[in-house]
Amino acid sequence: MSILTVTYHSKALSRPTTFEMLIPNDSDSKCPIKALFLLHGYNCGAFNWVPEYLCEKYSFAVICPNGENSFWLDGISTGHKFATLLGEELPDYIRRTFGLAEKREDTHIMGFSMGGFGALHTALAYPDVYSKCAALSSALIVHEVAGMLPGSHNGVANYEYYRECFGEPSQVLSSRANPETLVDEILAKGGNMPEIFMACGTEDFLIENNREFHAFLEGRSVKHQYFESPGIHDMPFWQEYAVKAADWMFGK
């Protein structure tokens, strides 16, 4: 297994950015190496939380970008195009530089919490780039953001923060920052719908948000995998389901 730290100049972010990368270089597999883009949560940074043996077993690379506290969206200010980074710039860079995951069916994305939201949003915004996404304990908070008023604070961040990430809160539900809007766009166009895997702990404070999005997908007849089991908003739960999601993504 090779572990790399790569720095390059990002046009999407208007500055150099760094990502971590794991490549299985001693696998017995004869298949092309696939790629899993792995997204961290709020107040975290880029790191690998998928067991390395899975990379060897299924012959896939892990790419861990740094999304800061962006919700993996294109913010309203210059240098905050994190959705563009994930959907266009970074997959293209990985393909051109490392020759990995050159096809949609070989390119997947997974994240937890804010990164779970990011995985869903990115796969739905760029369904011709990503074929599968796994979203764990996803921070599907667009409906809460939509109700925020100037000067308010929800105990995590203030109105100005959410406005920077999502755009004008009063307009967020009809915008492309809302995964529900993106689902409807794909359905209306008859486009590629990414395969979706969702999981959330029954004691997680985001469980109702995940249940609501699960119900939304069911209401749109969008095929997806949805799981609940005992657990809170923590790494043991995410690592448990990272293994299950990797088996689902890469297993035969």
Image (cartoon, rainbow, N blue to C red):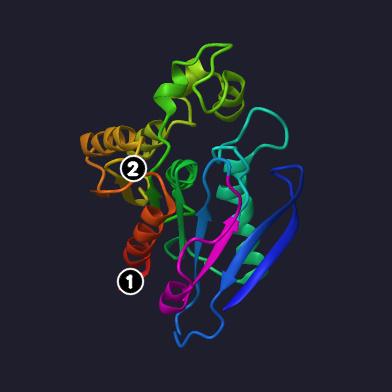
At 40% across and 34% down in the image, what residue appears?
140
How many C-alpha atoms fall within 10 Å of the one at disc 1: few (<14), some, or many (≥20)? few
Q: Nearer the viewer, residue 92 or 142?
A: 142
Q: Secondary structure at mark 1?
A: loop
x, y (%) of residue 80? 67, 37
What residue type is disc 1 on? Answer: Gly
Q: How many marks?
A: 2
Q: Assess whether residue 76 is covered by the magenta stretch.
A: no
At 33% across and 33% down in the image, what residue appears?
209
State whether residue 206 is above or below residue 243: above
x, y (%) of residue 231? 31, 48
| Residue picked out by circle 2 | 190
x, y (%) of residue 59? 46, 76
* Residue 132 shows up from this direction: no
Q: Secondary structure at mark 2?
A: loop
Q: Residue furthest top?
A: 150
Q: Nearer the viewer, residue 77 or 183?
A: 77
At 38% across and 48% down in the image, what residue appears?
136
Q: Give the Cα distance between marks 2 and 1.
A: 27 Å
| Residue picked out by circle 1 | 251
Q: Nearer the viewer, residue 96 or 29?
A: 29
State whether residue 245 is above or below residue 170: below
Query: Quick check: 66 left or right of 136?
Result: right
**Chain part drawn in magenta:** 44-64
